[in-house]
Amino acid sequence: MRPNPGTTTEIIGTGDVDIPIPDNDPNGLVLGAPIDTEGTVVQATVSLRVDHPFDGELEVDLISPLGEVIDLFSNNFGQGLGSGALDCSGTQTTFNDMAARSVLVGPEGYSGSFNPEQPLSTIMGGPSEGQWNIRIRDTGDIFGGGSLRCAAITVKRVP
């Protein structure tokens, strides 16, 4: 696939962090940042590394500047969102519409690239400018103690 002329890539990332995911909290952990440059979204991906004892309690969403919520991962059973080191140097879970595997396959674990539960192409053609967020919710109260270790939103846009 040839790159689109004039395509610019914006990356919003946390770097190495250890942010607790609130247990059984409907608001969850929300983090992100604005993109200040106008443009039209042509592709988006989300990468993260989460340390949690039970993926079946986790929901992960991308929230676009227009408030569109894309369900990336919802209460799937697996063995981790990412693997290796508990920081950005480990293998992250990347949600990408062009991935060969579906996140719904499980339970071997989620290291590498996966198709999200809802396609990220839903936000194609929308504005790149504005607040982009990742929301992680721990929907159960049996297994607590999860943490976000690394996250990034990558947005490719054209003017």
Image (cartoon, helix red, strand yellow):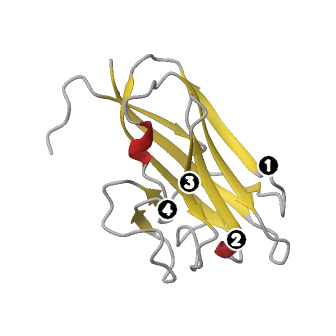
Q: Of discs 3 and 4, which sits in the foreground?
A: 3
Mark positioned earlier in the residue sequence (3 or 1): 1
Specify the farthest residue to the bottom: 108
Looking at the rendered structure, the kind of residue marked 1 is Asn
Mark positioned earlier in the residue sequence (2 or 1): 1
Residue 109 x, y percent position in the rendering: 51, 78
Q: Which mark is residue 52?
A: 2
Above or below 116: residue 44 = above
Q: Quadrant of the C terminus?
A: top left
Q: Which mark is residue 92?
A: 4
Mark positioned earlier in the residue sequence (4 or 2): 2
Mark positioned earlier in the residue sequence (4 or 1): 1
- Mark 2 to mark 1 CA distance (whole Å): 17 Å
Looking at the rendered structure, the kind of residue marked 3 is Asp
Looking at the rendered structure, the kind of residue marked 2 is His
Looking at the rendered structure, the kind of residue marked 4 is Gln
Q: Of discs 4 and 1, which sits in the foreground?
A: 1
- Mark 4 to mark 1 CA distance (whole Å): 24 Å
Above or below 79: residue 140 = above
Badge 3 element = strand
> What residue sits 46% from the left and 70% below the top?
111
Nearest the camera: 120 or 109? 120
How crowded is the residue under tag 2: few (<14 C-alpha within 10 Å), some, or many (20+)?
Answer: many
Check if mark 3's residue and mark 4's residue have beta carbons within 8 Å.
no
Check if mark 2's residue and mark 1's residue have beta carbons within 8 Å.
no
Nearest the camera: 12 or 90? 12
- Mark 4 to mark 2 CA distance (whole Å): 14 Å
**Residue on which the image places disc 3:** 71
Mark positioned earlier in the residue sequence (3 or 4): 3
Q: Which mark is residue 27?
A: 1
